[in-house]
Amino acid sequence: MLITFEGIDGAGKSTQIKKLVTFLTGENREVLTLREPGGTEVAEKIRQILLESRHEISPIGELLLFSASRAELIQEVIVPALAVGKTVILDRFFDSTTAYQGYGRGIDLHLLQSIISISTCGIVPDITFYLDIEPEEALKRKFSKTSIPLSFENEELDRMERSGTEFYQNVRKGYLELISLNKDRFVSINALQPETVIHHQILAFLKERFPA
Ligand SMILES: Nc1ncnc2c1ncn2[C@@H]1O[C@H](COP(=O)(O)OP(=O)(O)OP(=O)(O)O)[C@@H](O)[C@H]1O
Ligand SMILES: [Mg+2]
């Protein structure tokens, strides 16, 4: 089974993935957790290029780098893991590409779709949890544990995170549109709720959709 988590930076994806992995492992399920971009030696190198803030990268270059990283991960790791019955949990997958590079950077959505199909070998998640939060709230969260001044232009943020409020608002709009187009696959959760409440909602949805 392939489970993906989506949402803007700071929505709480990593927090919820950790809780879910603990739960599933306790149920004796074999779980593999991966983050995008990354997950193979080559893909981790691509991740460094994408997130290091000193690089200027064009929108198409960014799209192709994300897609190259994904192609490596799919072929080397995800397909073999699914084939032996593992539960694969992904921290971001191709919906991030549609939301960030499509709605955020403005790349044509049809073009994106073709590149996504090529890089994923047509693999689609069984279920996608989208954690919904306003960009400003997510930013506050990310900075709540530091004394860094709150701003999207802050040098402490990675290259993607410094793209600004309007960019993140467009990304969120993109996610909301994706959900309305893929209601069977997406579960949208209010990310402002307490962590444990969200965790139990996730478990309840999994039980409802996959009773066995
Ligand atoms: N439900 C919640 N309520 C309040 N704070 C939360 C909640 N979930 C996560 N947080 C806190 O918000 C911050 C961001 O959470 P987390 O790292 O899980 O988000 P993320 O979606 O993985 O972000 P990124 O995309 O940057 O990796 C962390 O400090 C985390 O402890
Ligand atoms: Mg995270």
Image: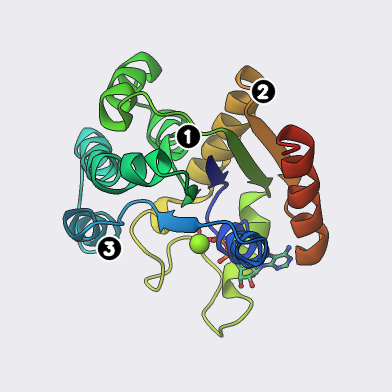
The label shown at residue 103 is none
Residue hosting label 1: 95
Outermost top residue: 110
Measure the alpha-carbon separation of dots 2 and 3.
37 Å
Dividing the picture into quadrants, the one containing residue 193 is: bottom right
Dividing the picture into quadrants, the one containing residue 177 is: top right
Say which element carries label 2.
loop
Q: Please tell me which residue lies in front, 25 or 181.
A: 25
Q: Earlier in the sequence, mark 2 or mark 1?
A: 1
The label shown at residue 184 is 2
Say which element carries label 1.
helix
Q: Which of marks 2 and 3 is nearer the N terminus?
A: 3
Foreground mark, 1 or 3, reads 1
Left or right? Give the position of 62 relative to 135. left
- Figure disc tally: 3
- For label 3, the crowd category at 10 Å Cα-Cα, with few meaning under 14, some 14 to 19 and many 20 or more, is some
Give residue 66's position: percent from left, percent from top.
Answer: 28, 43
Residue hosting label 3: 53
Q: Which of marks 1 and 3 is nearer the N terminus?
A: 3
Foreground mark, 2 or 1, reads 2
Residue 99 visible to an observer of this rendering: yes
Say which element carries label 3.
loop
Please state which amino acid type lies under the numbered disc 3: Ser
Task: Name which residue lies at 26% across and 64% down.
Answer: 52
Left or right? Give the position of 200 relative to 173. right
Measure the alpha-carbon separation of dots 1 and 3.
23 Å
Colour scheme shown: rainbow
User: Disc 3 beta carbon < 8 A from ligand 1?
Assistant: no
Q: Is residue 181 shown above or below 57?
A: above
